[in-house]
Image: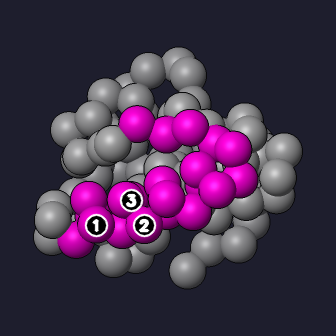
């Protein structure tokens, strides 16, 4: 499942970069580190300004395909960041 998460992130990263949002390559361990901190993922603010938070790491973390990879606390942090930014479209 981790390989699928990485592939899904890379696809979103490529799309985000077309919009000018720079995002570093990410694996599950890196995602967990970002979610445990106080800052949003790279590119989050750019994606928010473009109305494309669906491409963010946080949106991928709450995607039902990948929730088993994250603790409730990590998923809740991702969801809180998205909701605080006004994003309400979830799969």
Cβ–Cβ under 8 Å for marks 1 and 2: yes
Residues at marks 3 and 2 touching, judged by CB atoms closer than 8 Å: yes
Residue 79 in view: no
**Which residue matches tag 2?**
11
Q: Is residue 71 above or below residue 42?
A: below
**Pointer 3 residue:** 9
Check whether the beta carbons of the residues at disc 3 and disc 1 lie within 8 A of each other. yes
Res. 5 in view: yes
Spatial CA span between label 3 and label 2: 5 Å
Which one is in front in this view, the residue at disc 3 or the one at disc 2? 2
Q: CA distance from mark 3 to mark 1?
A: 5 Å
> Over which residues does the magenta segment extend?
4-24
Q: Which residue was labeled with disc 1?
A: 7
Q: Residues within 10 Å of mark 2 (few under 14, many from 20)?
A: few
Structural crowding at the residue carrying mark 1, measured as other residues with C-alpha within 10 Å and reported as few (<14), some (14–19) or many (≥20): some
Q: Position of residue 26 (x, y in %)?
A: 31, 43
Cα separation, mark 1 vs mark 2, equals 6 Å
Label of residue 33 in the image = none
């Amino acid at each position: 499942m981790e390989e699928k998460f990485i592939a899904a992130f890379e696809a979103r990263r490529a799309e985000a970069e077309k919009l000018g949002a720079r995002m570093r390559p990410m694996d599950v361990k890196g995602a967990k580190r970002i979610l445990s901190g106080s800052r949003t993922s790279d590119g989050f603010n750019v994606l928010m300004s473009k109305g494309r938070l669906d491409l963010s790491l946080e949106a991928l973390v709450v995607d039902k395909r990948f929730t088993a990879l994250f603790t409730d606390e990590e998923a809740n942090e991702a969801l809180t960041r998205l909701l605080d930014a006004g994003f309400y479209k979830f799969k």
